[in-house]
Amino acid sequence: MGRERSVGHAAAVHDEAPVTDAAAIDPHTAFADLGLTSMGAMTLWHRLGLRTGLRLPATL
């Protein structure tokens, strides 16, 4: 995956999870603990699927 594409995926996550300092986030933190709502999770799932061209599992 290219850098530009990775940045796009990260932007999709950032738009849905209200995080102010990404460097301070433990990579094992659940999205819900970052403030991501169920609607935000569905939006993120949809946007990542569109950006990657992959059919992502609903349990993602």
Image: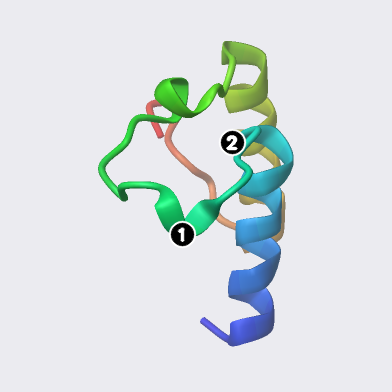
Quarter in which the C terminus is drawn: top left
The amino acid on which the numbered mark 1 sits, given as a three-letter code, is: Ala
Image quadrant where residue 44 sits:
top right
* Residue found at x 59% / y 15%: 37
Mark nearest the camera among 2 and 1 is: 1
- Can you say whether 52 is above or below 6 in the image? above
Give the CA separation, mark 2 to mark 1.
22 Å
- Residue found at the very far left of the displayed protein: 28
SS for callout 2: helix
SS for callout 1: helix
Is 60 placed left or right of 55 in the picture? left
- Residue found at the very far top of the displayed protein: 38
Q: Nearer the viewer, residue 20 or 31?
A: 20
* Residue found at x 66% / y 15%: 39
Q: Which residue is mark 2?
A: 45
Mark 1 surroundings: few (<14), some (14-19) or many (≥20) residues within 10 A? few
- Can you say whether 34 is above or below 20 in the image? above
Is 34 placed left or right of 18 in the picture? left
Q: Residue 36 shows which numbered tag?
A: none
Q: Earlier in the sequence, mark 2 or mark 1?
A: 1
- Residue 27: x and y in percent read 31, 50
Q: Which residue is mark 1?
A: 23
Q: Nearer the viewer, residue 29 or 24?
A: 24
- Can you say whether 26 is above or below 1 in the image? above
* Residue found at x 65% / y 71%: 7
- Residue 4: x and y in percent read 69, 81
The amino acid on which the numbered mark 2 sits, given as a three-letter code, is: Trp
